[in-house]
Image: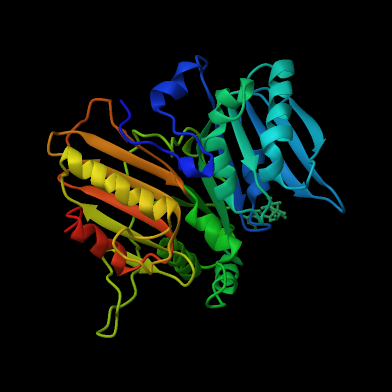
Amino acid sequence: MVVVLAQDTRDSHTCISDHERRRGSPHVKVPLTIICGFLGAGKRILTEKHGYRIAVIMNEFGDSAVTKTINVSDESGQESEEFLELANGCLCCSIKDTGVAAIEKLMQRKGAFDYILLEATGLADPGPIASLFWRNEEYTTGLGRDIVLDGVVCVVDAFFGKQQLEEDDRDEGQEPGESIRQIAGADIIIINKIDLVDSGRVAAIENTIRLVNPVASIHKTIRGEMDLGQLLNMNAYSSSRQLAVHTREHEHVHGDDCEHDHQTHYETRGINSVQISVPSLSTPQIDTLDAWIRSVLWDNKLPNESNTSLEVLRSKGLFVTTEGDQYVLQGVRSMYDMSKVEEDILGLPDEGKLVLIGKGLDERVKRSLITLGLAR
Ligand SMILES: Nc1nc2c(ncn2[C@@H]2O[C@H](COP(=O)(O)OP(=O)(O)OP(=O)(O)O)[C@@H](O)[C@H]2O)c(=O)[nH]1
């Protein structure tokens, strides 16, 4: 059923189809959500409050070593904790072996749990961790096949967040800071500590967030107070998830000197996003689109432009075909999956949509698609 392959084979990744993936994994998979966010933003509070049977994995810096806590609690409030030394001090490097093995051991002893929350350190870019879990079936046996990446949550500090974003965005030509990468890679963004600021400041940070990420849903909280059900089972990486694109609530006033296209292109220094309407495509055009996506995600360039330099952190898309089919694109960095939606489709949209979040995404992206007849 899957038409398009998902991995860059030249980078020793394996191309796998949905069918192959499902074949060897008869169990119900445990959804895993990555919680990242600014230092001190309130990530801990979020993971403390729940009545679900959840394993919470934390990555903390101690004096010299990094420890990881696995904390399982159930409806009765019973909790248990395990402390683990991480071999090289980096969660995203260690989770592959130490971390996955530890979760597996815990599951064997305690019985399966319903959900895993992985709290990354405030300095962590969620992209590498997300891609690790998204393709975990490929390199692990046992538990690895039983975890499915549900999505990435980013907690932003309403009080210090804007300042932190501006500091990360300050130096032109330098790599975008982690806080911008965290927002770029998030599926849900929580603006926490809104009790400490006025509504204008909340609106300002929301606008800044939307500059970077037009697809994440945004929640505003005090002490992380929200229905955890809104975070769990978000299915952000599911091929059947519909694509919602949010526009900014508080647009700036457009003047004659505005050089950017407000319909399709938001930009903040460092990381920006584009959203492009894609007309109904024929089946050969879906293949052309796939080749275009491969060029952008794998070669970091537009197929018909020699001097572009792109870095896509997150890609999403929904495409409709002239035959009445629907395809969903999900991507994190160079990994992507574009699958035909098999479920019954209730009303086909008139046109599709492509959203890319990353670096170097300017008007040439849309022009390139127009040249190939994939955008208007
Ligand atoms: N006023 C106020 N304080 C909050 C809120 N949420 C969290 N805090 C406080 O902010 C501090 C940091 O909260 P944590 O949950 O530890 O933050 P964290 O993101 O886990 O911190 P790190 O893991 O160190 O990055 C604590 O003292 C919390 O009590 C909020 O909504 N309002």
The mark total stands at: 0
- Residue 45, how many percent across, how many down? 66, 46
Which residue: 23% across, 36% down?
A: 326
- Above or below, 161 relative to 184: below
**How is the rendered protein coloured?**
rainbow
In the drawing, does residue 256 fall left or right of residue 233? left
Q: Give the residue at the far left of this rendering.
A: 322
Hey, which quadrant is residue 364 in on the image? bottom left
- Residue 20, how many percent across, how many down? 43, 22
- Above or below, 203 relative to 297: below
Hey, which quadrant is residue 40 in on the image? bottom right
- Pick the front one: 295 or 120: 295
- Residue 190, how many percent across, how many down? 52, 52
- Quadrant location of the C terminus? bottom left
Which residue: 25% across, 42% down?
A: 287
Which residue: 59% across, 44% down?
A: 129
Which residue: 61% across, 37% down?
A: 117
- Residue 340, how many percent across, how many down? 28, 32
In the drawing, does residue 105 fall left or right of residue 218? right
- Pick the front one: 143 or 33: 143
Hey, which quadrant is residue 136 in on the image? top right
In the drawing, does residue 96 fall left or right of residue 127? right
